[in-house]
Amino acid sequence: MRMNTQQYEYIKYVDIYRKEFLSNFSIFAEEISQLELSMGKPAIDLKSIADIIKIKIEYAPDIDDSGEYNRDENRIIINSLEPKNRQRFTIAHELGHAVLGHPGISKRTESYADLLQKSRETLANKFASELLMPRTLIVKVMSVIITEQGWNQSSLTDGQTDFLVENSAEKLEVSYSALKFAVENNNIFIRE
């Protein structure tokens, strides 16, 4: 429900995600594609996505890793002691395990038992990055900032691009390093 329709544009998830990415959500893809976000607060609503795919999210201070997904219980547990942006990435990562059909209990950790686990972790990270920072949304958020700053988007300085990444990361509720990586992978800024 929209409380205040000010000057902010509302866009549907179908307009910011690639069709192939949404298809990962299988029978829930259509419902997720109809979710909306405000360009005034453009962070992806992970709770709504989890609710649609019927995954419970819990927070606990006493887990060893950043988070885990238990397929049998359809539950994600997040380390409540970590920073909010890290928690959001971990939720998106664990949603990736769920949506991609990874079996058993998946933990977000820095060490891997074997090549298969490492491959699943890499896929879940890629999924999380695209879920939180789809290219179209990054460009829209940065375009708003460029307009607000009165900058010429065809001749941005290195300082302006750093400012864009920092402020866009804040709006998307992701870390600066995660967004910088996504910007580079999506070729947002092309230098001649």
Image (cartoon, rainbow, N blue to C red):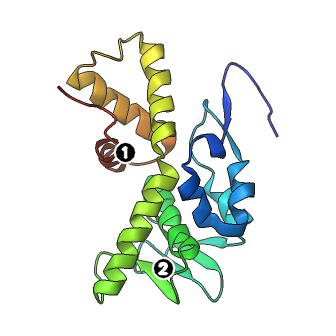
Residue 134 appears in the figure: yes
Residue at image position (36%, 84%) is: 117
The location of residue 1, given as percent across then percent down, is 82, 40
Residue at image position (61%, 61%) is: 23
Q: Residues within 10 Å of mark 1 (few under 14, many from 20)?
A: many
Q: Is residue 178 above or below residue 183?
A: below
Q: Residues within 10 Å of mark 2 (few under 14, many from 20)?
A: few
Q: Earlier in the sequence, mark 2 or mark 1?
A: 2
Please identify, in this view, whether the residue under mark 2 or under mark 1 is nearer the observer.
Answer: 1
Q: Is residue 16 left or right of residue 48?
A: left
Residue carrying label 2: 62
In which quarter of the view is residue 99 placed? Answer: bottom right
Q: Is residue 121 left or right of residue 34?
A: left
Q: Is residue 94 left or right of residue 4?
A: left
Residue at image position (63%, 65%) is: 25
Residue at image position (49%, 31%) is: 141
Q: Is residue 39 left or right of residue 157?
A: right
The location of residue 108, given as percent across then percent down, is 41, 75
Question: Residue lying furthest front in this view?
Answer: 20
In which quarter of the view is residue 20 placed? Answer: bottom right
Q: Which mark is residue 179?
A: 1
The location of residue 56, given as percent across then percent down, is 68, 73
The kind of residue on which mark 1 rests is Leu
Residue nearer the viewer, 90 or 65? 90
Q: CA distance from mark 2 to mark 1?
A: 28 Å
Q: Is disc 1 placed on a helix, strand or loop?
A: helix
Q: Is residue 92 above or below residue 113?
A: above
